[in-house]
Image (tube, grey):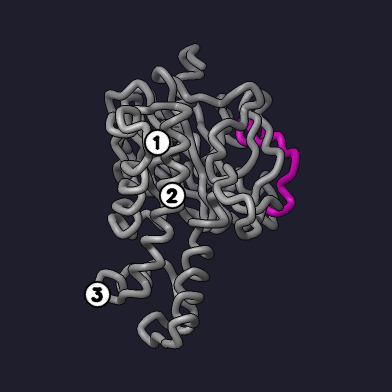
Amino acid sequence: MTLVLGVDIGGTDIKLGLVEGEGDIRGSGKIPTRPEEGPEAAAARVRLWLGESGDVQGKIAAAGVDCAGLVDGERGFLHVSPNLRGWENVPLRDIFERALGVPAIVENDANAAAYGEWAKGAGRGLKNFVCLTLGTGVGGGIVVNGALYRGSSGFAGEIGHAVICADGPLCACGNRGCLEALIGANAIVERAAGMLARAGESRSAWGASPTVEALSRAAASGDAIAAAAFRETGRWLGIALANVVHILAPEAIAIGGGVAGAGDLILEPARATVRDCRMDEAMASVRIVPAELGNRASFIGVSLLALGRLNGRR
């Protein structure tokens, strides 16, 4: 069975997976990214991890590398990443091929996660599928007729930067009212804090610096303001998902990422908002479901994409 290395580069950690041809994980690990040291140093640490992972280094047939940002998979370039300061116009594919001595591909992390979920998770057996990853940012990936859809620029799937509210809050990308600015982790915390202030209340249970996880626990325990913040978040998500359905008509949309850990606190109001749209037949045919693979989705997906490229598939 062919063995492929999946490398999921985040701002803090690099998640690694040794993935066999059918998507089965043979081994996994995590190492620090240390982005300030540059991509060559990161690739060297990946090589070191691989050398410490048993008798596998000479058995790796290919590597798949993913990260957040604008990734040109055809040229193997990372143009810019919000998590990797200083990594601009980086020939990431060449760097990892030199470090590991095997063919490599590079891909956007949300695209990789979507492909992983389609192949081995919530999208198994479907032809048309969309996956959103909710965290500090909001990423998206699209599978059409069983293939990852990248668009003519290679940058398709940036659902987090679809403008949902034209006069909404400022997004990190510079636009106003992007989905990311409305439902990212920071937006949820700010929404809950604003609701709390308007109610003239305080919440020691939320902690001095509230997190989405703390708010989720509070809402599950009956905190009405925390629950209301999630309902409003779910409503914005539902508006975005209704637009996705109108444009793409997928069989299912999976929601993953750290914020999605709030589960039905967000998903139920999102589903209700989608159901309220007027095109009932279009909306009724789409399932909105939790993602299944957690933080393994990206390295599984990018490994399978690398294997496909190795076997002559795009």
Give the secondary structure at mark 2.
helix
Asked whether the beta carbons under mark 2 and mark 1 sit within 8 Å of each other, the answer is: no
- Residue 105 placed where, x, y %? 56, 28
Local crowd at mark 1 within 10 Å, few (<14), some, or many (≥20)?
many
At horizontal 30% and vertical 56% (from top left) the residue drawn is: 263
Dividing the picture into quarters, in which one does residue 27 lie? top left
Mark 3, residue position: 221
- The residue where tag 1 is placed is 300
Q: Residue at 51% across / 17% down in the picture?
A: 314
Q: What residue type is labelled 1?
A: Ile
Q: Which residue is drawn at 30% across and 76% down?
A: 223
Where 211 sits versus 2, above or below? below
Chain part drawn in magenta: 84-98
Taking the view exactly as shown, the residue that stands out farthest to the front is 278
Specify which label sits upstream in the sequence, 2 or 3.
3
Judged from the image, the secondary structure of the residue bearing numbered disc 1 is helix
Q: Which residue extends farthest left?
A: 221
Give the Cα separation between the discs numbered 3 and 1: 35 Å
User: Is residue 97 inside the magenta stretch?
Assistant: yes
What kind of residue is marked 2?
A: Leu
Along the line of sight, which residue is nearer the eye, 62 or 88? 88
State the residue position of label 2. 237
Q: Where is residue 231 in the image (x, y as percent from the top left)?
A: 36, 61
Tag 3: amino acid: Ser
In the figure, is residue 84 to the left or right of 260? right
Q: Can residue 13 be seen in this view?
A: yes
